[in-house]
Amino acid sequence: MQEQEFTEWAAGCQRSLLRSAYLLTGDLHRAQDLVQEALVKVALRWSQLREGNPTAYARRIIVRDNVSWWRRRRETAVADPEGPAPDGVSSDPVTAMVVRRALLRLTPAQRAVLVLRHFDDLSERETADVLGVSIGTVKSQNSAALARLRTGAPELLDLIGERHE
């Protein structure tokens, strides 16, 4: 029974998690690896997580594992802004490229906040919980990201609509 519940949950959220991981990394293969690792970690703790919010836990794993990855490698840029994007980023290749290039202009922390707030539509509290930071940090990172996009990538602001500023 628990295995079936996990399988149904994973099938229902995998696409959304992959989109988020891709927007964080800009690299489809690394995003797929992050999602797979997160799903394995959720599966191992399914009995504790199934009654709570396993999707939030999976997002937290993806964000933290991505941060660990770029800290180990001292790489903060997205790997291939011209590479393939997973389903769900955009059905329009031009829009997908605009998103990837705009996200390149952000620090990893700003990118994480922007993805969680504007693409995953999480509240400030939910974003803070996923990232393990305060709501004030979420607000300041979001503000800094939007300011950076206003000067360097105003086309992305139209896509996200600045609805959470």
Image (cartoon, helix red, strand yellow):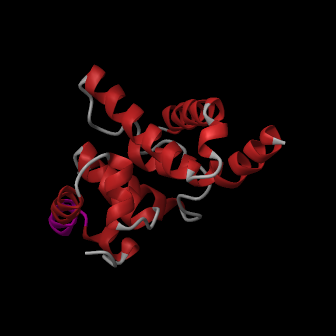
Counting from the top left corner in percent of width and height, residue 17 is at: 55, 49
In percent of width and height, residue 77 lies at: 28, 38
7 falls in the magenta region: no
**Considering only vertical position in the picture, is 71 above or below 17?**
above
- Residue under the point 55% across and 53% down: 53
The residue under the point 38% across, 72% down is 160
Residue 49 placed where, x, y %?
59, 44
The residue stretch that appears in magenta: 145-153
- Tell me if 43 is positioned left or right of 155 in this view: right
Residue at horizontal 51%, vertical 38%?
Answer: 31
Above or below, 21 against 30 in this view is: below
Which residue is at a point 84% across and 42% down the rendered structure image?
A: 1
Q: Residue furthest top?
A: 72
Left or right position of 50 against 127: right
Q: Is residue 142 above or below residue 76?
A: below
- Locate residue 36 relative to residue 73 in the image: left or right: right
Question: Total label count?
Answer: 0
Asked if residue 44 lies left or right of residue 92, the reply is right
The spot of residue 100 in percent (x, y) is 39, 52
Report the quarter where the C terminus lies: bottom left
Which of the 4 quarters of the picture holds residue 44? top right
Tell me which secondary structure the magenta stretch mostly adopts. helix
Q: Quadrant of residue 47?
A: top right
